[in-house]
Image: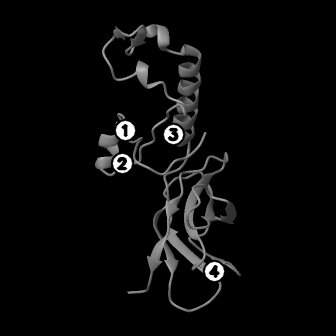
Amino acid sequence: MDLIPRPDRFLRGGDHLPFLERGYAAVRFTEPAEDYRHQHQNGRTELGVQYGDLPEFVDFSYIAQVARVNAAGLASLALAPAAPREVGIEVVALENDTTLRWSANAEPDLAAYRIVWRAPGELIWRHARDTGNVTRYTLKGISKDNYVFGVAAVDRDGNASPASFARPWRPH
């Protein structure tokens, strides 16, 4: 799968857009080489070409695979702890370390937190460090100026929440 950081494809929209517009995380799964003749159109034949959303143009094996991916993703989210809240990067000194802090989760089977980071512009977390069950951690020699950071919660079975993005934090 390829992650494309855009609300949707150009000139059309999916069922996920109303969720995005209301602030919910949403993802659209679509095949990379769409056949525009067989979607979003009433059935008809023009110059010997069949158009329309018709069952004979559906790849049911592909749909089954997409359903499996969706089910696995939902099951993973359902088993995982809640995403950490109030995740912040301490911006109190000029230094080449990064200190993150967050509020403790309430789940009784919480085992640890995982700090994740990536270069700006990358779409997936490239680096991770498990911290144990703490709510503040310093990454030595990793500059807050060079990466995007997040924190995920991990339970005793290894289920991990989605990462919460870190925002600048200063003491009041």
Sequence-wise, the earlier of marks 2 and 4 is: 2
Which residue is situated farthest in the front direction here?
47
Q: List the residue tagged with mark 2.
A: 24
Q: Residues within 10 Å of mark 1 (few under 14, many from 20)?
A: some
Q: Are marks 1 and 3 in contact (CB under 8 Å)?
A: no
Marks 1 and 3 sit apart, C-alpha to C-alpha, by: 19 Å
Marks 2 and 4 sit apart, C-alpha to C-alpha, by: 30 Å
Q: Which circle marks residue 143 in the picture?
A: 4
Sequence-wise, the earlier of marks 1 and 4 is: 1
Q: Residue at x 67, y 45 (%)?
A: 157
Marks 2 and 1 sit apart, C-alpha to C-alpha, by: 9 Å
Marks 3 and 2 sit apart, C-alpha to C-alpha, by: 16 Å
Left or right: 12 in relation to 144: left
Q: Are marks 2 and 1 in contact (CB under 8 Å)?
A: no
Of tags 3 and 2, the one toward the viewer is 2
Q: List the residue tagged with mark 3.
A: 78
Q: Quadrant of residue 16?
A: top left
Q: Is the residue 66 above or below the residue 8 in the image?
A: above
Identified by mark 1, the residue type is His
Return the x and y of residue 11 as percentages of the image width and height: 34, 39
Q: Are marks 3 and 4 in contact (CB under 8 Å)?
A: no
Q: Is the residue 55 above or below the residue 147 in the image?
A: above
Q: List the residue tagged with mark 1.
A: 16
Identified by mark 4, the residue type is Ser
